[in-house]
Image (cartoon, rainbow, N blue to C red):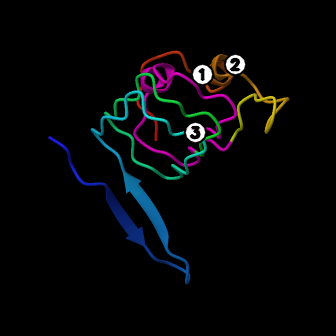
Amino acid sequence: MLRPLETSYRGGGGRASVTTILEDANLSWAFLSGANLETALLGEADLRGADLGEANLSGAQGWTDDQLKAARSLEGATMPDGQGLKSDVSHPDGPTFEEWLKSKGGGEDGENE
């Protein structure tokens, strides 16, 4: 069943922030290159084959290492911790996805916030 895209608005200090709720969303094989997924809730989202190249995942929550491993591309993406992955265009000196996983102690299937 297709669920509508949900957003949550939080105000504070005169500045509102938006959280996109993508929990349980089927994003398999979606073209999300350059998408702004900042602070998105990704719990149980299907990212198999998704193109997340150059996407902004800063502050994304609920994701697992396995979800991100299943994506087709994360080249140049800004990861949930704010670090940019290697890309010929945006981050030529950034780490590869595998290097990023190792640096955060990844490789396990744990859920991240």
Q: Which mark is residue 99?
A: 2
Q: Choose the circle earlier in sequence order: 1 or 3.
A: 3
Left or right: where 19 falls relative to 56: left
The residue positioned 19% from the left and 44% from the top of the image is 2
Is residue 77 a member of the stretch shown in magenta? yes
Residue ID at (65%, 41%):
78
Question: What label sits on residue 33 in the rendered view?
Answer: 3
Which image quarter: residue 92? top right
Give above or below for 109 relative to 80. above
The amino acid sitting under disc 3 is: Ser
Q: Residue furthest left?
A: 1
Compared to 92, does 99 lie above or below? above
In the image shown, does 25 or 2 lie closer to the viewer? 2
Please report whichever mark, 2 or 3, sits nearer to the chain's N-terminal start: 3
Q: In x, y percent, where is residue 45?
A: 34, 35
Q: For the residue marked with disc 2, what is the amino acid?
A: Glu
Q: Position of residue 67 (x, y in %)?
A: 42, 25
